Amino acid sequence: MGKFGWLDSHAHLSDDRLYNRIDEVIAKCEENNVDKILTICLNFEELEKAFEVKKRFPQVDIAMGLFPTDYDLYTEENWKRLEEVSQDQRIVAIGEMGLDYYWEKDEKQREVQRINLKRQIEIAKRVNKPILIHSRDAAKDTIDLLKEVNHFGVMHCYSYSVEMAKEFIKLRYILSLAGPVTFKNAREPKEVAKMVPMDCLLIETDSPYLTPEPHRGKENEPGYVKHVGEYICELKEIPNEELQEAIHKNYDKLFKVNR
């Protein structure tokens, strides 16, 4: 076994499906050589749960942000709270945030998403922390907005084309690949996995969603990130240890996390 294990750069450990069996979830990570998890909080109740998890399991890092379609959470009180917690040293990134046009067809509401995204990015810039971008059916608007605001971070669960991937990389965004890269008919994620430079790559589960093969159809968990990593190694024709080292270096550099 090499110096580095696998890591999961995007999971939702505060989701009751994982939180209510957290000991089992972490044990599965240890069994599968997963030594780092970034848990994503989408509201302040989830954040409190994440702080509790981190107390027990220091290999867990925390990000906090407001999801694009959770419109009821975008209150002035919550903006103030987000500004405050963004300064907490336990929070290594702001997000996930972004644009989701798959679930939102109304153009006025899409504009609300764009305004909210810019405001969250401004918070991240003030504390100089990376952002985690959720982008679905909104590639052009995402690119245009990120060019305008000039920050850096991760394209979570990257699902667009190779051409778009190159554009995001130019803007200082790391691409994080998830379970869909293992799906039989998912051509584009496989092409992206082959082309993305090693210093621009992370892997994730987005658990409890998007379970990779061979567990597709079951509930996802961070321990399954090894299947994403091993599959990418097959596509890139590299040993597991090479990818493990690369993703840890990318993670530590981006999030300024000491191992």
Image (cartoon, helix red, strand yellow):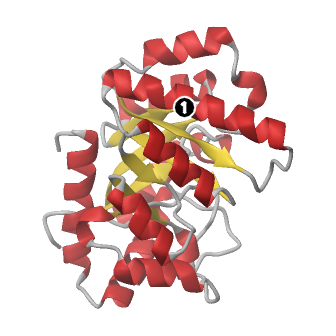
Residue 13 is situated, as x and y percent measured from the top left of the image, at 54, 43
Q: Which residue bears the numbered disc 1?
A: 118
Q: Classify 10 Å Cα crowding around label 1: few (below 14), some (14-19), many (20 and above).
A: some
Q: Is residue 151 left or right of residue 117?
A: left
| Amino acid beneath label 1 | Lys
Q: Total of numbered circles in the picture?
A: 1
Q: Is residue 233 left or right of residue 141?
A: left
Q: Tell me what residue is drawn at x 74 percent, y 52 percent.
A: 101
Q: Tell me what residue is drawn at x 41 percent, y 56 percent.
A: 8
Residue 232 is situated, as x and y percent measured from the top left of the image, at 39, 80
The front one of 191 and 138 is 138
Q: Tell me what residue is drawn at x 45 percent, y 23 percent.
A: 123
Q: Is residue 124 left or right of residue 36?
A: right
Q: Quadrant of the C terminus?
A: top left
Q: Quadrant of the N terminus?
A: bottom left
Q: Is residue 70 left or right of residue 10?
A: right
Assign a secondary structure to mark 1.
Answer: helix
Q: Tell me what residue is drawn at x 75 percent, y 41 percent.
A: 110
**Quadrant of the rendered structure where residue 248 is?**
bottom left
* In the depicted structure, whether residue 136 falls above or below residue 78: below
Residue 77 is situated, as x and y percent measured from the top left of the image, at 64, 8
Residue 183 is situated, as x and y percent measured from the top left of the image, at 60, 82
* In the depicted structure, whether residue 93 falls above or below residue 153: above
Q: Residue furthest left?
A: 3
Please say whether residue 44 is visible from this viewpoint: yes
* In the depicted structure, whether residue 254 falls above or below residue 124: below
Please say whether residue 24 is visible from this viewpoint: no
The front one of 72 and 230 is 72
